[in-house]
Image: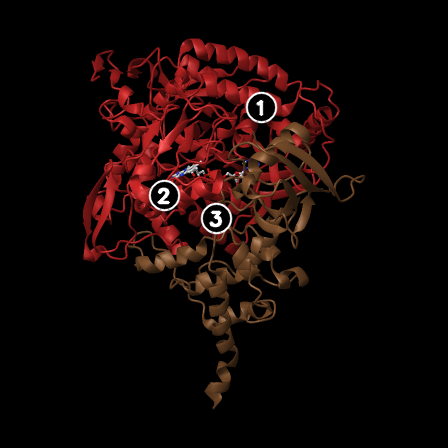
Chain colours: A red, B brown
Amino acid sequence: MDTVVSDLLCIGAGLAGERVAVEAAAAGFSTICLSIVPPRRSHSSAAQGGMQASLGNSCMGEGDCPDVHFEDTVKGSDWGCDQEVARLFVERAPEAVREMAFWGIPWNRVVAGKSTYFKGGKQYEKVEAPEKEGLITARDFGGTAKWRTCYTSDGTGHTLLYTMDNKVVELGVTVHDRMEAISLIHDGENCMGAVARCLKTGKLRVYLARATLIATGGYGRIYRETTNAVINDGGGAIIALDTGIVPLGNPEAIQFHPTGIVPTNILVTEGCRGDGGTLLDVNEERFMPEYEPAKAELASRDVVSRWMTHHIRRGLGVPSHYGDHLWLDIRHLGAAHIKTKLREVEEICNNFLGIDPVTQLIPVRPAQHYTMAGIRTNKDGAAYGLKGLFAAGEAACWDLHGFNRLGGNSLAETVVAGKIVGEKVVEYLKGHEARFDTGVVRDRVRRDQERIDRLIGCKDGKEDTFKVRSAMQDELMERVGIFRNGKDLQQAVDNLQEILQRARRVGLRSSGLGANPELTLALKIEGMVKLALCTAYGALQRTESRGCHAREDFQARNDRDWLNRTLATWKEGANLPALEYEPASPSMPLPPGDRGYGASKIITCDGEIIDRG
Amino acid sequence: MGRHLTFEIFRFNPEDKDSVPHMETFHLEETERMTLFIALTRIREEQDPSLQFDFCCRAGICGSCAMMINGRPGLACKTLTRELPSEITLLPLPVFKLIGDLSVDTGTWYRAMNEKVESWIHTHRSFDPRAEEQRMDNALAEEIYELERCVECGCCVASCGTANMREDFLGASALNRIARFMMDPRDERSSKEYFEVVGTDEGIFGCMGLLACEDVCPKNLPLQDQLGILRRKMGWQAVKHLFRMG
Ligand SMILES: Cc1cc2nc3c(=O)[nH]c(=O)nc-3n(C[C@H](O)[C@H](O)[C@H](O)COP(=O)(O)OP(=O)(O)OC[C@H]3O[C@@H](n4cnc5c(N)ncnc54)[C@H](O)[C@@H]3O)c2cc1C
């Protein structure tokens, strides 16, 4: 068997994977990154908004510091995050931004003097201080007390990823792109690397490593509608879950975005609504004021998404070939405003919809956006359950975000966690030798080859892998979406269990030769349905509302019973995950309280009921 | 409601010994706001699950899906079918190694390019985690960003007369990358060092000035200007010593 050995194997070459790789390579360890696509095409490149760090250079960020960032993050998470992790993160974020500047990011800088900005549909003025001229500036992003989001125009993720990959090239880190990990090699205690399938030739290869990192990003593609890239289908989470030992943290914690365009779900910024854009239904009438008289379209992400879904279910959506949707109307903002302040939106409309938002309506609907769920690690990034296995970035549940990620905190997480976990991986490599058990390796490869042969030979059946995927995606979209209730969740769990059986009967229609895309999906489909079941089942069990997990039948946040984190593992041959729970945070320097937004009913740790409704 | 679309798609799977390069026809009813991403995904899922092509972000950001669309390189995700005639011919990008059907290996090519132009900040300083960042004029940051917007999709390379003839030509995206670093005060490389990378026929002097690169760039990068500036700077670098002697 074609075998490659290194000190560190990074499965994933997005921002998080590459940041860890850089740390290990700089310390002199041989490092290999695997990626489905050339590293610069990883989904990190799609982040446009920016990354949070409390530099406090802009006048709108005056007085900002790690403490304020900490408070925003913990509140944002609805007290679901690990507060030790949040503390570590906020302390190191400013340094991480500066380090990226040192490596070449053209961050936008403070320009002294007057300028204007929009908020809540109104225009305001600000004056930047002359002594801050030329320092890294920041913009506003939801859920923060200060302007804290550092950015490069409309391409922050792009510049971050290009700069990081430049560093990878400079350090001579090996990257094998189009190489997809399909299983982890382990003996129940130690992780020894992974088996990967080459997406150029279809051949299998063994990667053995003293330490293995999973940094495969989010897995929004288990939902039908998602802003995530096509490749975000959960490969990393699947191979971890398949070990039967490594748990996923909070699989029910999934974030949605209200305005993905139809049909491609490309995200259009919330700035549209912030600047005064409205949402219209099939009759071209506004509906948000009816549901949220005070805030209307300016209510929070989740609330807007909820009412949009509700309104569509009432039959007031606009029918289309791609299902029902609503309209986003920014026509009244005028050509001048749209062409300057909302230029990206105009471009997306022109390029991907062929419409002119100055005169036409934009078709939108809510879409899955961020996976807080992920491979559960400790604060060093070491995965629970297997020695030598680490995880970082959106793939991990480190757990910075708890039940709701703040915009701008995820890009920051990739580079900050990447740095911290990278340091810990280096420590681990200095202190540990590995033993590679050839029997374990051979057995793993044999099982993967057998899986491939069975799929190609239709040994288990002829279920169409694309149809199984659609069935799963529809189920999650319809019943495990933004607003959840016991009846629907139970139905989803039942249906997904049937879909899981179908997934086990998948057989290929095509030859499966070479980089065959049908085989690529077929190898993952059972794992994807398992991820879907973890989400649905975790959501069914959690009888409270917290952050993005909103139960119509349990509307209060229940700190008495649910101030904890779900841990889901999947035992071999099981049809449902095994769920356990651990305290949300080892300590609570910021005790649970009111977020000041979102759900307002709280059952406190002492069982007292507070309702600010 | 929609038109009837006919796709002529290049097929070849090098890993299948029975496969020979050929064109294959697929039919699809056009739907509203259809892009080539929607169309190709449907063809794969409904008609031929072995069809190879590359989409990732499907939002014009990652540069994965460049292909020859009716004879012209472009990003498939950013191409609306309604802007095309009802007969659509799709071929893989030339210059790059074919993986199968519409999929080509841009990853290896661009990694080599980045190594060749040493696409990173060259500095003798080391990072001080406690120090304030080096200041920069916002206008300059934006200028650098303007050139940094390249997504390495390969459209410029595929459209380039020189790159199609000689394998070692760096191409517009590499020259643009050099221009980006030359503009950056954090990079301490001298003109002479840049000259060693690009002052050759593989570099700036290989450009025949046909400038199709700028026409096809999906990011509308000002490639023509950058090539011109670089050519003048490097031309001067090549002859500078003559003047000094005199
Ligand atoms: C549209 C959009 C906009 C966003 N905007 C912002 C923003 O403004 N600010 C912010 O903070 N966050 C934003 N986010 C979130 C943020 O971009 C991501 O959370 C972050 O970039 C994830 O980085 P990552 O390194 O963890 O994963 P990714 O960048 O997704 O990288 C994953 C890597 O893993 C590889 N991979 C996957 N599976 C396998 C496998 N099985 N084998 C081998 N390799 C594999 C991939 O090829 C890739 O290299 C946005 C997200 C979206 C979808």
Q: Is residue A435 visible?
A: no
- Is label 2 or label 1 in front? 1
Against A196, residue A453 (above or below) is above
Q: Chain of mark 3?
A: A
Going from the N terminus, do you reach mark 3 or mark 2 first?
A: 3
Residue at the outermost top position: A487
Going from the N terminus, do you reach mark 1 or mark 3 first?
A: 3
Q: Chain of mark 2?
A: A
The residue positioned 30% from the left and 33% from the top of the image is A73
Instruction: Classify residue A255 as left or right of residue A608.
Output: right
Going from the N terminus, do you reach mark 2 or mark 1 first?
A: 2
> Are both tags, 1 and 3, on one chain?
yes
In terms of image quadrants, where is residue B121? Answer: bottom left
As measured in the structure, the alpha-carbon distance from the residue carrying label 2 to the one carrying label 1 is 32 Å
Kindly check if marks 2 and 1 are in contact, taking CB atoms under 8 A apart as contact.
no
The image position of residue B206, as x and y in percent, is 60, 68
Screen quadrant of the N terminus of chain A: top right
Q: Is residue B167 visible?
A: yes
Instruction: Classify residue A569 as left or right of residue A208.
Output: left
Three-letter residue code for mark 1: Arg
As measured in the structure, the alpha-carbon distance from the residue carrying label 1 to the one carrying label 3 is 36 Å
The image position of residue A569, as x and y in percent, is 51, 20
Q: Pointer 2: what residue?
A: A50
Front residue of this view, candidates A177 and A271: A271
The image position of residue A122, as x and y in percent, is 22, 39
Q: Pointer 3: what residue?
A: A22
As measured in the structure, the alpha-carbon distance from the residue carrying label 3 to the one carrying label 2 is 21 Å
